[in-house]
Amino acid sequence: MTSWLERRPRAVVASALGAWALLACLLITRTPAGAFSHDFQGHVQHTRILYNQKRLAYPREGGETYQPPLYYMLNTLFLPNKPSHTFWVRLMSVLYGLLTLLLMVRFLSRLHISHSAQLMVLSFVATTPAFLFMFSTYNNDSLATLLSIALMMTLYEWMIQGKRPWIIGFGLLSVVALYTKLSVAFLLGPLCAILGVLAWFRAMRWERVRAVFFAVGVGVLSLGPWLIRNYRYSGYFTPSSADFPVDDRIHLSKTPFRTVFTLEGWSPSEWKDPYAHLWEGTHHKKNSFIAYVFTTSLFSEYTFEGFPQALPWAIALVHAILWMSALALAYRTKISRFSVGLLVLGAAALTSLIFRSAYASLMDFRYIAWAWLPEAVLYTTTLIPRNSEKSPSSKIFPALFISGAIVQSIFWFFLVVGGRWNIP
């Protein structure tokens, strides 16, 4: 089968993307308009303000009007006052997901990852419930994630090739991405920090790193008018929903410091299932930053009922095994070590949200969902052949990726045939 994949890579990619698009589209048609979309009504309201009143929304005018406007401007193209509006915007999210997967294929190809390894890893990532949710819902996270991964792709080409169009594209993408969602800063900051360290130790060319700093600076400066407007109408340069009255049930049960540095252990009351349980007061993952980010990277902040109990546990177990294995093998390549650094700094940047406002929902993985690309890079290290092709790992890891994608597809099946879930 591998030789067939290597001979017909484009056909394989097209088939895999088509299958994923079918999964996502069926999820759209079989679930309510606001399913798996955080603050659905607030996002629709923002779009309608732009469309009906022909002006920018004020930060405190609605639940999501503090967000940058670009995503909502694009949504105004789909007749916000029509009943079909939500369907078309969700369909656009599927398109963003397809483009994200194409960029990930392109990136892994540039790293000379075999087509069979790409297929296994990306099938596993793309069928993760949280991935399907993000790219089938009405939420600016879908476009922000696509643009973030495009930023990493253009940055990689600039650092390798040094051709001017790549750094110009990187600068323009920085502006567009920041005007889509400010959480893109959780990628740009760590990228600049790592590149600065590498340049300091002469592992990167200073002139190329300086160009990256300049491009990011242009992106940040371009936000000036927006930030000033925010401050004028809200008293905050970067307002968020947590700056206003929030349900106390989602408040952290510990101090932010203790939450970040708590390594989650086994507790029957907290781990009766692998869901985050944002609204629960006893069994939840709000005690540990790591636990909350991990569970939301799989199922977002939703709780699923009526499913076989073994199903979500199997998904969580496979992801945990592959994560730990990939981290243990990250020493193998420079790009995998870079990926680890990027993930660590990205997670550290995310913690800034809970130090500002101590709410569990601010630990959601979706704010750093661009981590799916470095995650995929790390996963490929488990598939690098060792000295002996007959080693157990040469069969175990492919089996885990394939079985994980199958189990996650079964989870999707339960969703589209009418599984019940609780929406935060």
Image: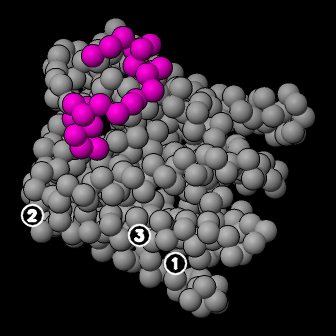
How many marks are shown on the rendered structure? 3
Residue at point 51%, 54% (across, down): 322
Assign the magenta stretch its main secondary structure.
loop
- The secondary structure type at the circle numbered 3 is helix
Q: Which residue in the protein does label 3 denote? A: 403
- The secondary structure type at the circle numbered 1 is helix
> Does residue 227 appear in the picture of this structure?
no
Q: Which residue in the protein does label 2 denote? A: 418
**Residue 262 lies in the magenta-colored region:** yes
Question: What's the residue type where badge 1 is placed?
Answer: Val
* Magenta extent: 253-278
Q: Give the percent coordinates (x, y) of residue 3.
A: 64, 89
What is the distance, in whole Å, between disc 2 and disc 3 at their CAs?
A: 23 Å
Question: What's the residue type where badge 2 is placed?
Answer: Gly
State whether residue 276 is above or below residue 261: below
Q: Which residue in the protein does label 1 denote? A: 13
> Does residue 63 appear in the picture of this structure?
yes
Horizontal side of residue 287 vs 80, given as left or right = right
